[in-house]
Amino acid sequence: MEKNRYTVSVYSENNVGLLNRISGIFLKRHINIESLNVSKSEIENVSKFTVVIFTDHETARKIVGQIEKQIEVIKAYFHLDDETIYQESVLFKIDSSLLFDERNIQNIIKDCNATIVTVSRDFFVLAKTGRKFEVDEMYDKLKPFGIMQFVRSGRIAVTKAEMPISVLLAEFKENK
Amino acid sequence: MNSNTIKENKTPNKKIETMNISGAEAIIHCLLAEGVDLIYGYPGGAIMPVYDELYKFQDRLTHILTRHEQGATHAAQGYARVSGKVGIAMATSGPGATNLVTGLADAQIDSTPMVCITGQVGSHLLGSDAFQETDIVGISTPVTKWNYQITKASEIPEILAKAFYIAKSGRPGPVLIDITKDAQFDTFDFSYEKCTGVRSYKPVPKPNTNAIAEAAKLINEAKKPMIVFGQGVILGEAEAELKQFVEKAGIPAAWTILGVAAMDSEHPLNVGMVGMHGNYAPNVLTNECDLLIAIGMRFDDRVTGNLETYAKQAKVIHFEIDPAEINKNVTSDVAVLGNSKETLQLILPLIDKKNHDEWHNEFKKRYDIEYNEVIKNDIKPTKEGLTMGEVIEEINIASKNSAVIVTDVGQHQMIACRYAKFNQTKSNITSGGLGTMGFALPAAIGAKQGAMDREVVAIIGDGGYQMTIQELGVIFQHNIPVKIVVLNNDHLGMVRQWQELFFEKRYASTVMVNPDFVKIAEGYHIESKRISERSELKNTIKEMMASKNPYFLEVKVEKEDNVFPMIPTGASVSDIRLK
């Protein structure tokens, strides 16, 4: 079956150990997690996991079903890249001398729409938010000058379609 | 009773309150409020405060000291499977907790409601590699429906209420609650309310009337329909609904090994077992039916054989409580989500009364083939050595099909499930999904204690018996009148069979040199006997069944018999071999 990149979005309670429980479901099927982000969501006291995996549609569907049946998971979804708006953030730590000595660096910052987070005597920090290929492009441009540290966040994504979690929670309240 | 501030809990849903008690005592009150009267377990350092309370409450809560924590889990499972109630196992931290893992995994895959309570080192020691510290929450996560670590006494009532609710609601399963020692010692103002819902958890999906109408249409149009039912019928207490449905629609009904006792073995529409060592007719006809109606079963690979060739010609209707099972292994044309009792009740009025006589003949024809090729030789053998099948047949006769049969794993299990007959539900207790050797002896203890008025017979192989043989100590100490039948072929029979058939008879580590099992049973003061002749079989089984005490019977059976029919791994259900 054809493999694709899927963004799995999981709405859940914010409880200790749930990350272990969810990651175990990928582990059980020997699926590598390409990127993971956990944060609060649009609903108070509800967490959101954003997990990127590379697999076929059927496997993604079954994994999402098995995630969703975990007690503390409210609802899980999976989407293809073109069904979501997604970004990731990166930080580059670079030697300060380069900012002044290498004109190109300033051009790269402008071209890539990166921002300077801080400048100190020894180093400066660049931040960039964008899609993976944009970030990769900036990385490739900066690489020849030397990067002291680099870090990339997990993908964060919102979907074009609705994910009606509030409705589910309201239903529970009514039934109770 | 040690706390006179506690009011008698006669109305189970009533809120119970009391002032300033320890976490350990609170645990006892939670268990009592949930109707628990029996716990299987093993004490140790980190759970001692709870055992101290158990000592004080022994008039209301019986604790059975199993000889190994694994035994506690299987006993709790056996208890849960016959009674439909939640089984309880308790253990200390570290090795006590890790010894629960096999039972948890077994209960998880076979959907058995169980609550395990483990002690944990004090919360100030967590993560420090303290004595008998192990991350049991981490370890047990993949094999529990839910688990939680309590570090404050005040969390106990809410978490235990949730544990019971989750273990038994929807598709049942095991829950593990780990409680630090300081949370057991600390005192707090206790109040208890049963859990009635968890907002992120929908145990039973609402039946969809469109799906039910669509399913009814397919059923009414089908010319060659076939039912395969599983344990979901028993867990949903839908046995009567299943019977009405089968009889009205006139559809042949086959079962998975966990579903067997949901329908009387002698019912004319009961066409036997599906799967690897199931009956010939339902396996072959799975690939000839035009409609396959799966009820409360999950298309395990041992049931389906090769999925690429499984029931491809048929439309499939799947009655199921767990949405994650829909289209997991077999794609269904109509999924009927919900509790099987409810969904079967809803579909019943929409079903036309039918007979399907010609179609039944197809089953009958193939049963006759199987009878002549396999069954006759198994249950009425003419060769010299005793067969496992004839032992089961004698038990059927002596018990009039009414016994609870507990089996271990391997050849004897397949033979017992093929030939044991049942006239009551919740009667076949076996390790289905996990295939846990060592399950039967402790599970039989739990089964007997969960159904004291019923005869409980454990059928065990010589291999699995020795994995949990120490639980004879429990049977002796508490005089639990289970009947233990070891079918001894001096081999790990099923593995030996595979070696014979698929590994060119290279019998690697499957020959067992066994001890004198009768002497071992005698060491535990259990009445015991060994037989090896057919002439002794009938009377010995009668004698065993008539005994009011625990009874151990070793039957020396043919050493190199194979279980047939058989679907070799990777083969299609219709390629089932009769020899």
Image (cartoon, rainbow, N blue to C red):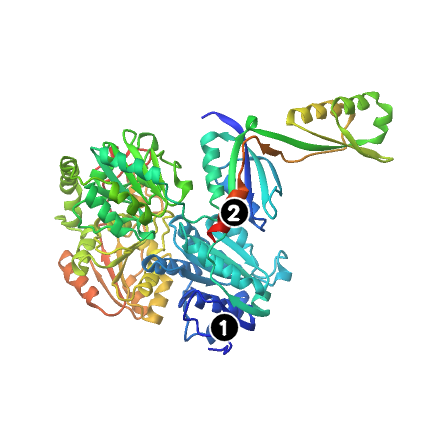
- The answer to which of A84 and B520 lies nearer the viewer is A84
Amino acid under disc 2: Ala
- Location of the N terminus of chain A (image quadrant): top left
The number of numbered discs placed on residues in the rendered structure image is 2
Pair 2/1: label in front = 2
Q: Left or right: B311 with respect to A26?
A: left
Q: Left or right: B411 with respect to A95?
A: left
- The answer to which of B388 and B371 lies nearer the viewer is B371
Q: Residue at x 47, y 72 (%)?
A: B54
Residue B124 in the image: state x and y as whole percent. 64, 61
Could you tell me if the residues under marks 2 and 1 are in contact, i.e. CB atoms within 8 Å? no
Secondary element under disc 2, as helix, strand or loop, is: helix
Up/down of B25 relative to B503, above or below: below
- The answer to which of A23 and B326 lies nearer the viewer is B326
Residue B514 in the image: state x and y as whole percent. 31, 56
Residue A133 in the image: state x and y as whole percent. 65, 24
Taking the image as drawn, is residue B396 in sight?
yes
Taking the image as drawn, is residue B120 in sight?
no
Up/down of B543 relative to A163, above or below: below
Say the numbered circle drawn on residue B53.
1
Say the numbered circle drawn on residue B284.
none
Sort mark 1 into few (<14), some (14-19) or many (20+) by Cα contacts within 10 Å: many
